[in-house]
Amino acid sequence: MYNELRNAFRPAIVLLLAFAAITGLAYPALITGVAQLAMPAQANGSLITENGKIVGSALIAQGFAGPGYFHPRPSAAGKGYDASSSSASNLAPGSKDLRDAIAARVAEARAQGMTGVSVPPDLVTTSASGLDPDLSPEAALSQVSRVARARGLGEAQVRALVESATEYPLLGIIGDPHVNVLLLNRQLDRIGVTSKG
């Protein structure tokens, strides 16, 4: 009886160990190696470094609040832009809490001198992750006046910076035009004009 059970379980245990080694060790190691060779920056988190110091990731939004910086989308992650607590608000479109939050964000944007007929939706709504690093070009351009004024720059110069930072859909069809806020603010800082706010 014991030998029969052992003979019945042996193939199952061998297969379990073999598949664990293949799917849990060999395959991840192969994919990691290919990723490191083919696209090392993306495989390591798309980290942005300046002067040998990591200042962020192009994939994760950071909170920029001063008037001399472009502001990202609002964050629902943790207490705000907390990468260890990525999540959406999960509020329904008809939720009073959501309507109140959007109304408050619109009023704040207007108080900060937002230009344009309407405030772009991505400046008053959170993303599904709560950490979306990108804005629509319209949302970035609506902040040009405030940023230019705070930094003592010409609006045309700041507008040109936004336009040069705009990334377009892959092959003209995959995705939407967008501006990475962290990369845009890093370019702004490299101009060498100190923000007044």
Image (cartoon, rainbow, N blue to C red):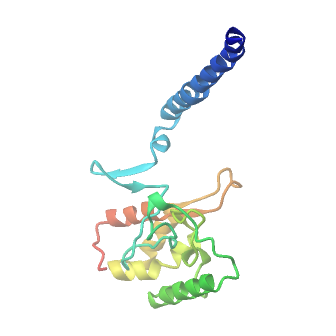
> In the rendered image of this protein, does residue 114 appear above or below residue 14?
below
Q: Nearer the viewer, residue 187 or 98?
A: 98
Q: Position of residue 37 (x, y in %)?
A: 49, 31
For the view shown, which residue lies furthest in the top direction? 3
> In the rendered image of this protein, does residue 126 appear above or below residue 106?
above
Compared across the picture, whether 195 is left or right of 71 comes to: left
For the view shown, which residue lies furthest in the front direction? 1
Q: Residue at x 51, y 33 (%)?
A: 32
Q: Residue at x 40, y 71 (%)?
A: 64
Q: Residue at x 63, y 17 (%)?
A: 14
Compared across the picture, whether 121 is left or right of 162 comes to: right
Q: Nearer the viewer, residue 98 or 9?
A: 9
Q: Nearer the viewer, residue 135 or 103?
A: 103
Q: Quadrant of residue 172?
A: bottom right
Q: How many marks?
A: 0
Q: Quadrant of the C terminus?
A: bottom left
Q: Position of residue 160 (x, y in %)?
A: 47, 69
Q: Position of residue 165 (x, y in %)?
A: 49, 62
Q: Residue at x 34, y 51 (%)?
A: 49
Q: Position of residue 1 (x, y in %)?
A: 72, 11
> In the rendered image of this protein, does residue 107 appear above or below residue 17?
below
